Amino acid sequence: VQLQASGGGLVQAGGSLRLSCKASGTNFRINDMGWYRQAPGKERDMVATITSGGGTNYADSVKGRFTISRDNVRRTLFLQMNGLKPEDTAVYFCTSSMRYWGKGTQVTVSS
């Protein structure tokens, strides 16, 4: 299983980014998927998850700002991030059923 995350970058506070995670080697359609993030010196925390049926769950800190979605035909997971804050700065990882992890993509939000 390979998960390739992309879309990170440097953005000013209040800006937006859209992360993508392309999956291969797995039956994407039946897997629960998620985004986690890890800031320097901190633990990896859940950002958002989406079940195979489309049910979503968000960390309180991102509710109303981030949206997780999936395209089963393109085998791709997305994270739309709006209203970014400096505290959103972290490496963002996608995961398949919390069993397989991508390498992560850096998101940096400047104040």
Image (cartoon, rainbow, N blue to C red):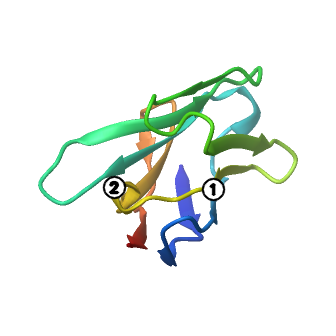
32 relative to 59 in the view: left or right: right
- The tag on residue 82 is 1
Q: Single out the residue that lies furthest toward the left.
A: 41
Q: Tell me which residue sits at (44%, 42%) in the image.
A: 100
Q: Tell me which residue sits at (56%, 64%) in the image.
A: 14
Quick check: 39 above or below 98?
Answer: below
Residue 20 x %, y % = 65, 60
Residue 48 x %, y % = 53, 35
User: Circle 1 sits in a helix, a strand or a loop, which is it?
Assistant: loop
How many badges with numbers are in the image? 2
- The tag on residue 27 is none
Q: Tell me which numbered mark, 1 or 2, is placed earlier along the sequence.
A: 1
Q: Quadrant of residue 86?
A: bottom left
Q: Tell me which residue sits at (42%, 62%) in the image.
A: 104
Indicate the amino acid at tag 1.
Asn
Q: Single out the residue that lies furthest toward the right.
A: 73
Quick check: 93 above or below 65?
Answer: below
45 relative to 99 in the view: left or right: left
53 relative to 108 in the view: left or right: right
- Circle 1: is it few (<14), some (14-19), or many (20+) Cα within 10 Å? some
Residue 84 x %, y % = 52, 59
Mark 1 to mark 2 CA distance (whole Å): 13 Å
The residue that disc 2 covers is: 87
Quadrant showing the C terminus: bottom left
Foreground residue, 20 or 103?
20
Indicate the amino acid at tag 2.
Glu
User: Circle 2 sits in a helix, a strand or a loop, which is it?
Assistant: helix
Foreground residue, 63 or 30?
63
Residue 77 x %, y % = 68, 48
